Image: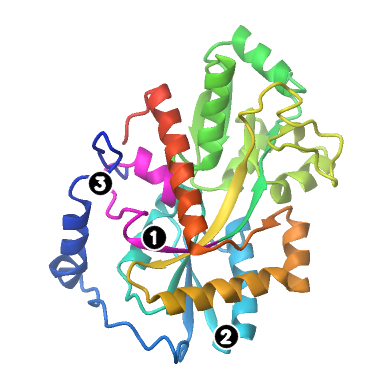
Amino acid sequence: MVNAVSEDNDGTVPGRRRLMAGLLGGAAMAAGLPARAAPASAARWPEQPIRLVVGYPPGGGTDTVARLLAQQFADSLGQQVVVENRPGASGTIATQQVVRSAPDGYTLLFATASPLTGAPLTMKGLLYDPMTDLAPITLVGNGPFILVANPAFPPNTLPELVEYARQHPGQVNYASPGNSTANYFFCELLNLEAGIKTVNVPYKGSSALVNDLIGGYVQYTLETPGTTLPLIRQGKLKALAILHDQRLAKAPEIPTTIEAGYPQLVGGSWYGLLAPAGTPRPIIDKVQQATVAALKSPAMSTALDERDVLAQGNTPEQFRQFIDAEYRKWKDVTQRIGIQPQ
């Protein structure tokens, strides 16, 4: 199991910079990895194909949004954008690869919350620091989770789930795509806020998780509307609540967590674009501008709307502040729960 990094009282990670220096130098050479090259001329960028690294398998929600963005990039930047899937360890394998890449704008990371705000809190021995080893470019989009359950599970609403869990302590389980994911953190936040104890059953990805939920091997989970709404309409899953401040226009029958009395449970998945630290600011700005333009395009707008992903496109500074706020939020939750890095 991948292991987590210890922190000082101020939230910094001792030795990370020394670790990364070794990793990018002699350790990288020993592993047969190329040393970082000098940054290319920002004025001429891009002069060759761009790699967009995704930490999840092809065909999933993250991969789908990444490929939509890659197509728009290819049209606006005039270079091929190749999506490279590097799944494993909650997105940290892909993140480590990008951290080790040359800061020249030709390797970018399409990330979720897991490797940026979850893994630093739950994994030992993490070989990168998201706040110092990556350059934020922009928040691409986000969307709320839906709390869904197997149709045979007795509760039909969030308050009923809470009451059922109180009456069956330790006997109710939920599925998550891993202990570093936003799905996991929100389920544990529900446990905290409701004063209940449900058991996490971690999976390596959403596909197996959803299949087992439909089969009744697990009882509930949090997943995106794009994944859950078709299954809800087919009667394979039932919705208990949406983690949002308003009901979805596509599914107005699903009550919000605020209506259920849990205003802290608002949020879901998000996607962001980052580059290796040291990437020239002019290149960062070109990518950010291309992303904003892509998000405004009719094709991208329609595709995101179909998946209930709200387009963002903020500045690198705003995205850095967003990541930091998310990290501090979940750090507080892990401390209250007493989660130990593994």
Q: Nearer the viewer, residue 41 or 128?
A: 41
Q: Mark 1 or mark 3: which comes first in sequence?
A: 1
Q: Mark 3 points at which residue?
A: 125
Q: In which quarter of the image is residue 175?
A: top right
Query: Where residue 251 appears, x then y in whole percent?
Result: 84, 42
Describe the element under mark 1 as helix, strand or loop.
helix
Amino acid bearing label 2: Leu
Q: Position of residue 180 (x, y in %)?
A: 44, 42
Is there CB contact under 8 Å for labels 3 and 2?
A: no
| First reached walking from the N terminus: tag 1 or tag 2 | 2
Q: Position of residue 322 (x, y in %)?
A: 50, 50
| Mark 3 or 2, nearer chain start | 2
Q: Position of residue 290 (x, y in %)?
A: 59, 76
Badge 1: how crowded within 10 Å, few (<14), some, or many (20+)?
many
Q: Is mark 2 on a helix, strand or loop?
A: helix
For disc 3, the neighbor class at 10 Å (few under 14, some 14 to 19, many from 20) is: some
Q: Mark 1 points at which residue?
A: 95
In depth, the one of 133 and 28 nearer the eye is: 133
Cα distance in 3D space between marks 1 and 3: 14 Å
Tell me, yes or no, if residue 176 can be seen here. no
Report the Cα–Cα distance between label 3 and label 2: 37 Å
Looking at the rendered image, the quarter that the C terminus falls into is: top left
Give, as a three-letter code, the residue at label 1: Thr
Count of residue discs: 3
The magenta-colored residue range is: 116-138
Any mark on residue 188, and which?
A: none
Secondary structure at numbered mark 3: loop
Q: Nearer the viewer, mark 1 or mark 2?
A: 2
Quadrant where the image shows the N terminus = top left
